[in-house]
Amino acid sequence: MPIYAYRCTQCGFEKEVMQKISDPLLTTCPSCQAETFAKQLTAPGFQLKGSGWYATDFKGGSANKPASAESASTAPSAASAPASTTGSATPAAPSTSTTLTSS
């Protein structure tokens, strides 16, 4: 059951009330008995944890940037690019040998 925060606009009295979504709103202030008791807008009281879509898709930062956005914003030159870990600076060419078959 949700907890709603109420505040009186006349006297400033604040109270948190646990009530159903279908329950009518409270309008009478328990402190001054005025009809100025209003529901406040508050932040949700829960936190999502784990490795779900909310943690990977909407967090700020550069760890999960798409490749197209990253290359457009910071395109390193070939001279400043680090060498690959395989030891060769250029990719290997495909094999061009042909196989002879006898007929």
Image: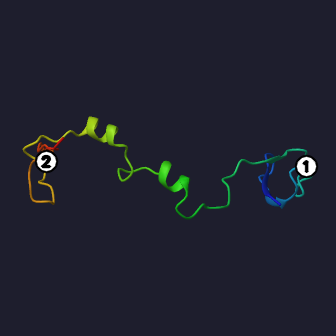
Q: Quadrant of residue 86?
A: bottom left
Helix, strand or loop at label 1? It is: loop
Q: Quadrant of residue 14?
A: bottom right
46 on left or right of 83 = right
The residue located at (55%, 58%) in the rendering is 52
92 on left or right of 27 = left
Q: Position of residue 8 (x, y in %)?
A: 81, 50
Q: Position of residue 41 (x, y in %)?
A: 71, 47
The residue located at (55%, 64%) in the rendering is 50
Most distant residue in the top direction: 72
Q: Position of residue 95 (x, y in %)?
A: 13, 46
Q: Which mark is residue 22?
A: 1
Most distant residue in the bottom direction: 50
> Which amino acid type is shown beneath numbered disc 1?
Ser
Q: Which of the two discs, 2 and 1, sits closer to the camera?
A: 2
Alpha carbons under labels 2 and 1: distance apart = 66 Å
Vertical arrangement, residue 3 with respect to residue 24, above or below:
below
Q: Position of residue 57 (x, y in %)?
A: 49, 49
Vertical arrangement, residue 20 with respect to residue 79, above or below:
below
- Quick one: label 1, few (<14), some, or many (20+) residues within 10 Å? few
75 on left or right of 51 = left
Q: Nearer the viewer, residue 78 or 41?
A: 78
Residue indicated by mark 2? 91
